[in-house]
Image (cartoon, rainbow, N blue to C red):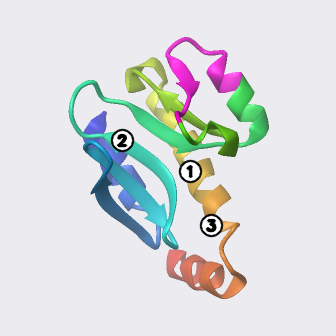
Amino acid sequence: MLDLTFNYCLSFPGVTAEEKWDEEMCFSVGEKLFCSVRVDPPYKLSFKCTPGEFHRLIAHPGIVPMPYLARYHWVQVKHPASLEWNELQGFIQQAYDLVVNTLPPEERDAILKAKV
């Protein structure tokens, strides 16, 4: 699951990856974080989501508000295998889209053009 997540995050246009904070691989677009994965056990996956998804997700066993980022609607999946891969892909795609949509128009347009 870890390799799948890494490859999936890097498949989006304009994404950069950098290891930060206690062995977390952080995925950003336009220098704004949208997803992070702990690279050593215990594997944890964190991502940005909508306010509605935030409340639905944290009601799910094994998913908690992300420390320090919960107020920005970030969740942490304590066991990534607790979500089906296709569902996890949807949440990562949504996190990416949420961040891209906050970028300045010129930067967003350049990224979206690269997507085509």
Query: Which region is colored magenta?
Result: 56-67
Q: Nearer the viewer, mark 1 or mark 3?
A: 3
Q: In the rendered structure, which disc, 1 or 3, sits on the residue that comes first in sequence?
A: 1
Q: Earlier in the sequence, mark 2 or mark 1?
A: 2
40 relative to 50 in the view: left or right: left
Instruction: Give how far apart the Cα atoms at labels 3 and 2 are.
Output: 19 Å
Q: Position of residue 94 (x, y in %)?
A: 62, 49
Tell me the tag on residue 100. 3
Disc 1 packing (10 Å; few <14; some 14–19; many ≥20): some
* Residue sticking out furthest to the front: 68
Picture disc at residue 93? 1
Tell me which residue sits at (52%, 33%) in the image.
67
Examine the rendered structure and indicate whether residue 8 appears above or below residue 28.
above
The stretch drawn in magenta includes residue 63: yes
| In the image, residue 62 above or below residue 6 | above
> In the image, is residue 51 above or below residue 108?
above
Say whether residue 14 is left or right of residue 61.
Answer: left
Q: What quarter of the picture does the C terminus occupy?
A: bottom right
Task: Name the residue tied to disc 2.
Answer: 37
How far apart are labels 1 and 3 at the CA level?
11 Å
Quarter of image, res 112: bottom right
